[in-house]
Image (cartoon, rainbow, N blue to C red):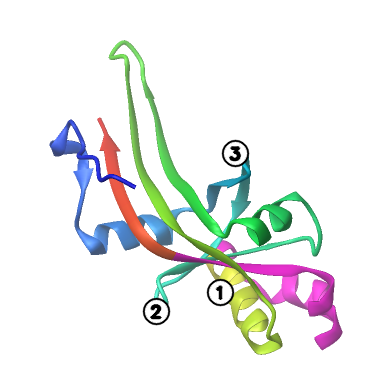
Amino acid sequence: MPKYHMKKKEREITDPEELKQILKSGKYAVIAMCRKNEPYLVTLNYGYEEIRNCLVFHGALKGLKLDFIAENPEVCATVILDEGYVKDNCSHRYVSLIIRGRMTVIWKLEDKKQALDILLNHLEENPAPIKARNIKNEMSYDSFAMLRLEITEMTGKKGN
């Protein structure tokens, strides 16, 4: 894929720490997938795993997104921190990321446990009650899928 440059360079976010902070602050990503020239978008809550620089998601064991990933694991995603429209200025305050990477299903139990912990710790102030309510034993992990988006490229942009 050809590289494009941002027209308004002053809006580009290049600092790796600032990009990581956006991932740490965000709560959802819109994932774009494609198979046989058919596009599909899905919005998912995520957890950010800083050590591996990846996002983790949970979902059903069967469904359209898993079908798409099986055929083409290369995805594009966006994370947006919306700070609102500026009235009478015709502008919008935001920061956004465009992420490219490879989406895989996490199958190993230990990896699945770790991914769920990352997701819950990212989204919840107190994840323990949610985990206790939904994970009764190790077989509980067989009732849902965990996905990992390995980030290979990321660009950031900020608006007024």
How far, Cα to Cα, is label 1 from label 3? 33 Å
Image position of 9 (left or right of 69): left
Identify which amino acid the numbered label 3 is placed on: Asn
Residue 151 in view, yes or no: yes
- Image x and y of residue 142, in percent: 82, 77
- Image x and y of residue 45, in percent: 60, 55
- Image x and y of residue 116, in percent: 64, 74
> Toward which corner of the image does residue 62 lie, by quadrant?
bottom right
> Toward which corner of the image does residue 73 lie, by quadrant?
bottom right
Q: Residues within 10 Å of mark 3 (few under 14, many from 20)?
A: few
Q: Are marks 1 and 2 in contact (CB under 8 Å)?
A: no
Identify which amino acid the numbered label 2 is placed on: Ile
Q: Earlier in the sequence, mark 1 or mark 3?
A: 3
User: Mark 2 falls on what kind of element?
Assistant: loop
Identified at 41% across, 64% down, the residue is: 151
Q: Considering only vertical position in the picture, is 38 above or below 102?
A: above
Image position of 156 (left or right of 52): left
Q: Considering only vertical position in the picture, is 9 above or below 131?
A: above
Identify which amino acid the numbered label 1 is placed on: Ile
Please name which of the two marks, 1 or 3, marks the residue nearer to the observer.
3
Q: Considering only vertical position in the picture, is 7 above or below 24?
A: above
How far, Cα to Cα, is label 3 from label 2? 34 Å
- Front-most of 116 and 104? 104
User: Mark 1 falls on what kind of element?
Assistant: helix
User: Mark 3 falls on what kind of element?
Assistant: loop
Label for residue 118? Answer: 1
Tell me the residue that label 2 is attached to.
51
Tell me the residue that label 3 is attached to.
37
Q: Which range of residues does the magenta coloring cover?
A: 123-150
Q: Residues within 10 Å of mark 1 (few under 14, many from 20)?
A: some
Residue 137 in view, yes or no: no
